[in-house]
Amino acid sequence: MTSIPHVTPGEPDPLRALGLEQLRCRTSMKWRTYPEDVLPLWVAEMDVPLAEPVVRAVTDALTLGDTGYPAGTAYAEALAAFAAKRWNWDGIAVERTAVVPDVMLGVVEMLKLVTGPGDPVVVNSPVYPPFFQFIEHMGRRVVEAPLGTDLRIDLACLEETFRDANAAGSGRAAFLLCSPHNPTGTVHTATELAAVAELAERHGVRVVADEIHAPLVAPGVTYVPYLAVPGAERGLSLMSASKGWNLAGLKAALALAGPAAAADLARLPEEVGHGPSHLGVIAHTAALRDATGWLDALLAGLRNNRRLLTALLAEHLPAIRPCPAEATYLAWLDCRALGLGDDPAEVFLDRGRIALSSGVPFGTGGAGHARLNLATSPEILTEGVRRMTAALN
């Protein structure tokens, strides 16, 4: 049998703090969408307690009755300090940032600034399903530039897509970049991102980068913010502490503009800044500023869980090929060899009572795949693979 990895020395691993009985008391989407006999390893929520500095900051605000509208630049300053220390990047200028309700609503607002109705927005499929939903809902056209067989950006395909997208439209195409990539966990290199920036400038395409998973890069892997590469001066980015510290219910994110995109960001409607939660801003600021030790412990736990999942699948479900992710807490599983059709997640749910995310909504390249959330305890992860195995037996 596969053994559960030992805890990494240092701060306690937050993934080991909560048992299934405690988690089932939660009322969020992950724990209330399916019946209680289903083990939920799907939506991007982590099975962790909040970092103590975040709890303290929010509790102090509640005690003060500090529950009004957000104000100030503390969030941007905390992100700038985090980026300088974590990614060796001093490129966040507070005056070129804006607080937005969350990353996806921020994406919508950035795309509104640089595109018009009917304009194309390029995405690298398979990719986060709300990209398709939000783009179409705002009256833009989704154009897919699928990842290569190595699940990295196919630059030749991207160039062809950029050229065709602007030639067929108003010349106001955009590229919605997912970095790190969801669902594959790919971390784009500085060379790849610089090539993207060069292609975008050559073909007149504006880049909007969703970098919500940036804090969740595996130890030893170098993360490069899109706005840090040469040629990205006209780029726009969305960042947040939401995924890294499990703060989806405390809404807040930051929009960042490259030096040549400052005028675009300045056109952001004033009312957009009314949407973020003041408590969200307080929580995210505390996470970035005071809870990096907690994040390091989480990253060590996720590294252990990736190794555990790889070992469990090799032992019990060798036909499933997990993508060797470098970031996020999501595992992209190639289940095509199992012969379960386009939607293996449906089979695992029906027969094994385990909820994974279907690969189909991720677009081209998603059929026959499933996404598993491994931000849970090793015991729950092991039970998840046991249920997947039982579904086939």
Image (cartoon, rainbow, N blue to C red):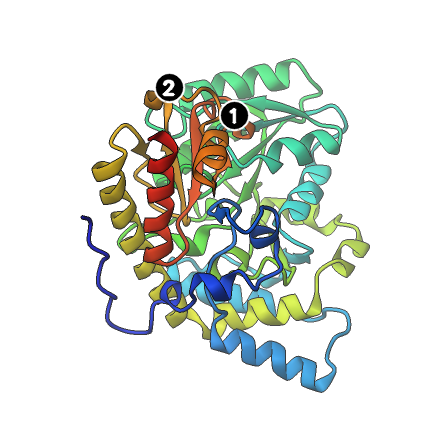
**Dot 2 amino acid type:** Gly
Which amino acid, by three-letter code, is at mark 1? Arg
In the image, 41 versus 149, the foreground residue is 41
User: Residue 177, image x and y in percent?
Assistant: 52, 37
- Spatial CA span between label 1 and label 2: 43 Å
In the picture of the structure, the residue carrying the numbered disc 2 is 339
Q: Is residue 84 above or below residue 174?
A: below
The image quadrant of residue 136 is top right
Is label 1 in contact with label 2 (beta carbons under 8 Å)?
Answer: no
Is 188 placed above or below 69 here? Answer: above
Res 202 label: 1
Q: Does 379 appear above or below 352?
A: below
In front here: 159 or 273?
A: 273
Nearest the viewer among 46 and 114 is 46
Does the image show residue 73? no
* Residue 165 drawn at (x, y percent): 60, 18
Mark number displayed over residue 161: none
Please state if 307 lies on the left or on the right of 119 as rendered: left
Task: Residue at 46%, 60% (x, y): give it.
Answer: 47
Residue displayed at 30% across by 48% down? 306
Q: Is residue 372 visible?
A: yes
The residue positioned 61% from the left and 57% from the top of the image is 28
In this view, the residue in front, 339 or 352, is: 352
Q: Secondary structure at mark 1?
A: helix
Residue 281 % position (x, y): 63, 67
